[in-house]
Amino acid sequence: MQQSKYDVVQEFDENQFFRKPDQYGYFSIDWDFTNNVSVSATGNYTGSMLVPYFGTKTDPGVGELHKSENFFDLGLKLKYTIKLNGLNLQFLGGIKNIFNSWQSDFDKGTDRDPAYIYGPVNPRT
């Protein structure tokens, strides 16, 4: 948990930094449950934040300040290792962003706001 604020009011009459959530965190867990099988889990939490928007749904040059939703991005990976002629051969399989957490209000069209992106990088993969 943290808070980023300017000493004086800025754009949109706000003193809070844009695109900087007050709550965020991550974890990474690796578990080797046999000599040749292991599981890894990673997670990223991003709390809501203020995001400026200057796209197709506003008057030109005016803009709006939106509050984003919270995101939780969870990934799992399974690794199987086979020893073959003194070498390790590994088979990996996994899934990223299991809950398919993503930004649902992307802007579209020629007058879209290309800077209006704030969610997880990858969809479920």
Image (cartoon, rainbow, N blue to C red):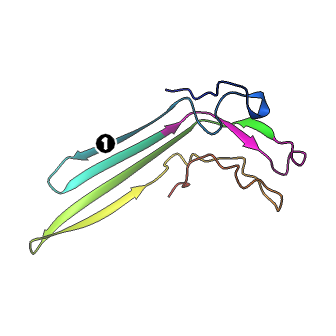
Q: Residue furthest front?
A: 7
| Main secondary structure along the magenta-highlighted residues | loop
Label 1, on which residue? 29
Looking at the image, residue 26 sits to the left or right of residue 70; the answer is: left
Looking at the image, residue 70 sits to the left or right of residue 92; the answer is: right
- Give the amino acid at mark 1: Ile
Q: Residue at x 58, y 29 (%)?
A: 4
Q: Secondary structure at mark 1?
A: strand
Q: Quadrant of residue 53?
A: top right
Looking at the image, residue 48 sits to the left or right of residue 8; the answer is: left
Q: Nearer the viewer, residue 34 or 107?
A: 107
Q: Nearer the viewer, residue 66 or 74?
A: 66
Q: Nearer the viewer, residue 110 or 87?
A: 110
The reply to whether the magenta stretch includes residue 55 is: yes
Q: Residue at x 17, y 57 (%)?
A: 36
Q: Residue at x 32, y 62 (%)?
A: 92
Looking at the image, residue 84 sits to the left or right of residue 115; the answer is: left
Q: Residue furthest left?
A: 86
Above or below for 94 versus 17: below
Mark 1 closeness class: few <14, some 14–19, many ≥20 residues within 10 Å: few
Coordinates of residue 74 in the picture (x, y in percent)? 45, 45
Coordinates of residue 1 in the picture (x, y in percent)? 49, 26
Q: Residue furthest right?
A: 59
Q: Residue at x 27, y 58 (%)?
A: 79
Above or below for 73 versus 84: above
Q: Which residues are magenta?
A: 45-63
Above or below for 65 versus 89: above
Q: Quadrant of residue 93?
A: bottom left
Coordinates of residue 83 in the picture (x, y in percent)? 13, 67
Coordinates of residue 82 in the picture (x, y in percent)? 17, 66
